[in-house]
Image (cartoon, rainbow, N blue to C red):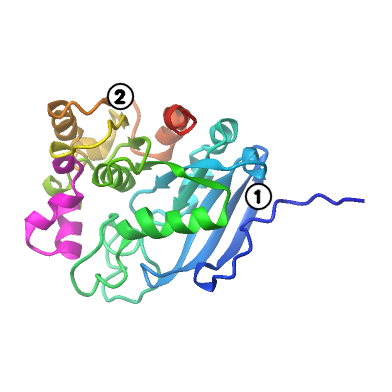
Amino acid sequence: THLSSAPCWPKRRLNSAMALTQVSSNKCCDGYQKVFEHDSSELKCKMKFAIYLPPKAESSKCPVLYWLSGLTCTEQNFITKAGSQQAASEHGIIIVAPDTSPRGCNIEGEDESWDFGTGAGFYVNATQEPWKTNYRMYSYVTEELPRLINSNFPADPEKMSISGHSMGGHGALICALKNPGKYKSVSAFAPICNPIQCAWGQKAFSGYLGSDKSTWESYDATVLAESYSGPELDILIDQGRDDQFLSASQLLPDNLIAACSKKKIPVVFRLQQGYDHSYYFIFSFINDHIKHHAKYLNA
């Protein structure tokens, strides 16, 4: 008799540089929520990422939505709190959620503060000592991780979108704006829209990129939007009105909206009454975001 078992992803590869170790696998919404570990060539350390494989992935290639998390998060926060699996299952979308920084690099000062170093990679390629060897999250997210996903899972390499929260919303926006045409769509929850103008961004960019502020601009969504030329990019942003970091001027969405309207980049910006910066807010609107991406990924 034929015993059917859980699908045997990842596909067996001989290339040991791409070797993946499965950390966990849980059936969820008829698909599988998994976590893998691998040795990252960009970050020079072991990294974990989460991947949701919808039921459709058992029979055909699926588009991929990359999710970038915020400060202090790991690959776990999104998969346990956002409730994304139901919509991903229905729309046949793979969701990949990487960690937010290199781990265990033993760099002096990496664990001193919650908004710099471990859990706070800011999705840049650092140019300064002692960070520049490991802190290359921008290349990890835009190059190494998609290569890894496309070669090991039933992913359609032509169909990628990107989303994220807070620091990860900043990451999603810059990845899309810096790579015209690479991502079919982009969305964000409470993104850090203009990091060169806020305390979080100034601290991170000073440390990772140095004191020459002109180098900061290539990682600032508002500045990038001002000079964007490429295929039309449809941006969806949700922002809680009661977000403490909005009132503390860390997020500065108005600056990005102004830049986008000047360049005629379509943005749907929704200020959500009563919502804060937490995953309760993300959980409340994640279905809208997955639907937004499905419109482009399943076109």
Q: Marks 2 and 1, how far apart in space?
A: 33 Å
Return the x and y of residue 288 as percentages of the image width and height: 44, 27
Going by the numbered disc 1, the residue's amino acid type is Asn
| Residue 209 part of the magenta-drawn span | yes
Q: Is residue 218 above or below residue 117?
A: above
Q: Is residue 229 visible?
A: yes
Label 1 near label 2: C-beta < 8 Å? no
Would you call the spot at circle 2 few (<14 residues within 10 Å), some (14-19), or many (20 or more)?
Answer: few
Judged by its main secondary structure, the magenta piece is: helix
Q: Quadrant of residue 121?
A: bottom left
- Counting residues from the start of the chain, the first of labels 2 and 1 encountered is 1
Q: Position of residue 21 (x, y in %)?
A: 58, 66
Q: Which residues are magenta?
A: 201-224
The residue carrying mark 1 is 26
Residue 122 in the image: above or below residue 173: below
> At x 27% / y 45%, what residue is drawn?
170
Quadrant assignment, res 114: bottom left
The residue identified by callout 2 is 270
**SS of the residue under disc 2:** strand
Q: Position of residue 241 (x, y in %)?
A: 28, 28
Q: For this view, does 297 lie left or right of residue 34? A: left
Picture coordinates of residue 183, whole percent (x, y): 36, 41
